[in-house]
Image (cartoon, helix red, strand yellow):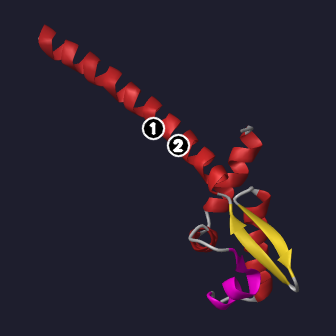
C-alpha cells in the first residue's frame, strides 16, 4: 500500500462513528445507508459522509439494490491495515529486545 492509502485508512478509522459502522458492516450481510442512519443520533447526510470516507479508504463498498444503497465491509483492506500494524509492532519489539540486551550487558560489566 502507498503512504497515501495508509493515511486514508487510518484517518477513516480515527473516528468512533466510522469504526462502529465498520464493525456493523463486517458482521454479516450488507446493510443500507438508511438502516445505518437509524442507529445514530445524526442526520442521514452525516452518515452518508461517514460511509463516503470509509469507501474512499477502501474499507467499505456500496452497491445499488433497487432504491437502496447497500454498504458492505471490505475485510481484506482491514487485514492489510492490521498487517502494517503487526509489522510496526514487530519492529518496536525488536528494538526493545536490543535495548534489553544492551542493558543486560551493561549490568554484567558492573
Q: Which residue is mark 2?
A: 85
Quarter containing the C terminus = top left
Q: Residue at x 80, y 69 (%)?
A: 62
In the rendered image of this protein, does residue 110 appear above or below residue 6?
above
Residue at horizontal 51 percent and vertical 36 percent from the top: 88
Residue 36 belongs to magenta span: yes
- Looking at the picture, tell me which residue is in the foreground, 107 or 6: 6
* Magenta-drawn segment: 30-39
Mark sitting on residue 17: none
Q: Position of residue 25 (x, y in %)?
A: 63, 71
- The answer to if 32 sits in the magenta stretch is yes
Q: Is residue 57 left or right of residue 101?
A: right
Indicate the quadrant where residue 69 lies.
Answer: bottom right
SS of the residue at dot 2? Answer: helix
Q: State the residue in front, 71 or 50.
A: 71
Camera-side residue of 8 and 104: 8
Q: In the image, what residue occupies the spot 62% across and 56% down?
A: 75
Q: Does 66 sit above or below residue 28? A: below
Q: Quadrant of residue 101?
A: top left
Assign the N terminus to one quadrant of the image: top right
In percent of width and height, residue 35 lies at: 69, 87
Residue at 15%, 16% in the rendered image: 107
Q: Is residue 103 above or below residue 2?
A: above
Rounded to the nearest angstrom, the CA distance separating label 2 from label 1 is 6 Å
Which residue position is annotated with label 1? 89
Which class describes the residues within 10 Å of circle 1: few (<14), some (14-19), or many (20+)? few
Label 2 crowd bin: few (<14), some (14–19), many (20+), radius 10 Å: few
Q: Is residue 86 left or right of residue 64?
A: left
Instruction: Find residue 6 and report its image quarter.
Output: top right
Residues at marks 2 and 1 touching, judged by CB atoms closer than 8 Å: yes
Amino acid at each position: 500500500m502507498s503512504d497515501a492509502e495508509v493515511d486514508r485508512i487510518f484517518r477513516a478509522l480515527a473516528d468512533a462513528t466510522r469504526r462502529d459502522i465498520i464493525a456493523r458492516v463486517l458482521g454479516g450481510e450488507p446493510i443500507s445507508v438508511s438502516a445505518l442512519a437509524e442507529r445514530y443520533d445524526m442526520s442521514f447526510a452525516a452518515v452518508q459522509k461517514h460511509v463516503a470516507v470509509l469507501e474512499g479508504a477502501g474499507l467499505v463498498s456500496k452497491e445499488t439494490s433497487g432504491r437502496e444503497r447497500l454498504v458492505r465491509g471490505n475485510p481484506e483492506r482491514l487485514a492489510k491495515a492490521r498487517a502494517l500494524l503487526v509489522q510496526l509492532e514487530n519492529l518496536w519489539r525488536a528494538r526493545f529486545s536490543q535495548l534489553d540486551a544492551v542493558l543486560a550487558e551493561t549490568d554484567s560489566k558492573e
